[in-house]
Image (cartoon, rainbow, N blue to C red):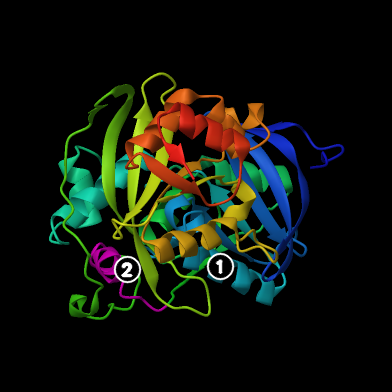
């Protein structure tokens, strides 16, 4: 990523990183990277065309959603909104997308995962907003100061024509000092997997067409039970905080989604989250094992998006038995090792965490000597 010559390195709380061209499914965008020194999180701004000038600028302010953008989850509309926003900006030939790391409406991945667990355990009688209230959380912790700072850093002085269905977000942007020229709705057709979620959004004031009746919603394949966080038996380093069912989108030309169990743990040593996916349905099959990692830019609909995870999902679903560990983009272990498997091999407890979800035997989805050795050391017979 090349630095931006002559530009001040700091604007408000944003430290400028650099920029490079990003080839998306909707054409080339320029990706500008910043570090928010308050949140200690990256901020990305994707721009298309000339963003300076007085004419209102089409813009999307998008909060991250790792479950839909990286994992392929179909239970919300976030990845669809990200794709639709880039498509509309590309069509306009001029605009900006501000990508903020504000998972779970700013409350974080753990809150988001527990939210989904509580909703599913209630059989959708509890909404996402009810779940936050039950956890003692406010409905929204997001802040938008970074958008005003990014506009100043990039010389964007025009008011924004915001692509959003959320009037609360638009009001919060204006309160943060962002000039607003107007609002354009951004909506995709609902699916059976996100009907309840979109219905809750609509009832909370989002400018959405009323989704189809919940009678058309997908049915959970098994009962989800809510629980309080507790150390994992035999591995007390890991605090088990959530387990729910995520419908992961199937690869085209297939339609629909595959139900996978998503487990979230908090590492008591580092405070980091660890995500494990499991598939169970074929008790006679040898479970497949996969270890992968996300990168921030691969959350976007890229022209040449890596297919390793979608292909792994297809194979895990076909086998009907398996386990996958997903390293998040900012896990420091990834910076110290050449691959996700090597990162796992460098931390024997992570191999034991995978072994916890296996019946003592496994087959690697892709041959990897370091992964095989780590699992063998954790007591798994690798075929």
Q: Is residue 324 left or right of 283 when viewed as pictured?
A: right
1 or 2: tag closer to the N-terminus: 1
User: Is residue 196 a member of the stretch shown in magenta?
Assistant: yes
User: Is residue 377 a member of the stretch shown in magenta?
Assistant: no
Residue 152 screen position, x and y as percent: 67, 44
**Label 2 crowd bin: few (<14), some (14–19), many (20+), radius 10 Å:** many
With respect to residue 23, does 214 lie above or below? below
Residue at 71% across, 62% down: 54
Task: Indicate the secondary structure of the residue bearing disc 2.
Answer: loop
Task: Indicate the secondary structure of the residue bearing disc 1.
Answer: helix
- Between 321 and 341, the one lying in front of the other is 321
Residue at 64% across, 69% down: 89
Residue at 48% across, 50% down: 64
- Name the disc covering residue 194, or none: 2
**Mark 1 and mark 2: Cα distance apart in space:** 17 Å
| Magenta-tinted stretch | 189-205
Residue 141 in view, yes or no: no
With respect to residue 25, does 149 lie above or below? above
Disc 1: which residue: 83
Residue 138 screen position, x and y as percent: 26, 42
Q: Are marks 1 and 2 in contact (CB under 8 Å)?
A: no
């Amino acid at each position: 990523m090349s630095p931006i010559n002559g530009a001040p390195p700091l604007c408000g709380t944003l430290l400028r990183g650099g920029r490079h061209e990003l080839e998306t499914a909707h054409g080339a965008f320029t990706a500008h990277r910043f570090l928010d020194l308050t949140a200690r999180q990256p901020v990305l701004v994707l721009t298309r065309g000339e963003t300076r000038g007085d004419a209102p600028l089409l813009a999307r302010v998008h909060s991250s959603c790792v479950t839909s953008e990286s994992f392929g989850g179909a239970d919300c509309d976030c990845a669809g909104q990200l794709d639709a926003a880039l498509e509309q900006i590309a069509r306009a030939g001029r605009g900006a997308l501000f990508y903020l790391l504000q998972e779970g409406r700013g409350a974080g991945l753990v809150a988001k995962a527990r939210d989904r667990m509580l909703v599913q355990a209630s059989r959708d009688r509890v909404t996402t907003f009810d779940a936050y209230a039950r956890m003692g959380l406010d409905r929204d912790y997001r802040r938008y100061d970074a958008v005003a700072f990014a506009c100043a850093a990039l010389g964007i002085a025009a008011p924004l024509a915001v692509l959003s269905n959320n009037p609360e977000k638009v009001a919060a942007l204006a309160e943060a000092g962002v000039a607003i020229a107007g609002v354009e709705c951004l909506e995709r057709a609902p699916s059976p997997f996100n009907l309840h979620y979109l219905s809750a959004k609509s009832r909370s004031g989002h400018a959405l067409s009323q989704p189809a009746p919940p009678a058309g919603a997908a049915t959970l394949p098994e009962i989800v039970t809510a629980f309080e966080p507790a150390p994992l038996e035999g591995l007390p380093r890991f605090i088990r905080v959530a387990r729910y069912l995520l419908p992961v989108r199937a690869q085209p030309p297939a339609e629909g989604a595959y139900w996978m169990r998503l487990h979230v743990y908090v590492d008591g040593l580092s405070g980091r989250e660890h995500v494990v996916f499991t598939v169970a349905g074929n008790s006679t099959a040898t479970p497949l094992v996969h270890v992968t990692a996300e990168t921030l830019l691969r959350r976007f609909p890229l022209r040449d998006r890596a297919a390793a995870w979608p292909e792994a999902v297809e194979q895990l679903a076909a086998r009907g038995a398996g386990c996958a560990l997903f390293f998040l983009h900012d896990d420091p272990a990834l910076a110290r090792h050449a691959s996700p498997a090597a990162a796992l091999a460098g931390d024997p407890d992570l191999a034991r965490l995978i072994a916890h979800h296996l019946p003592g035997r496994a087959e690697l989805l892709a041959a990897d000597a370091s992964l095989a050795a780590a699992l063998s050391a954790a007591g798994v017979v690798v075929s």
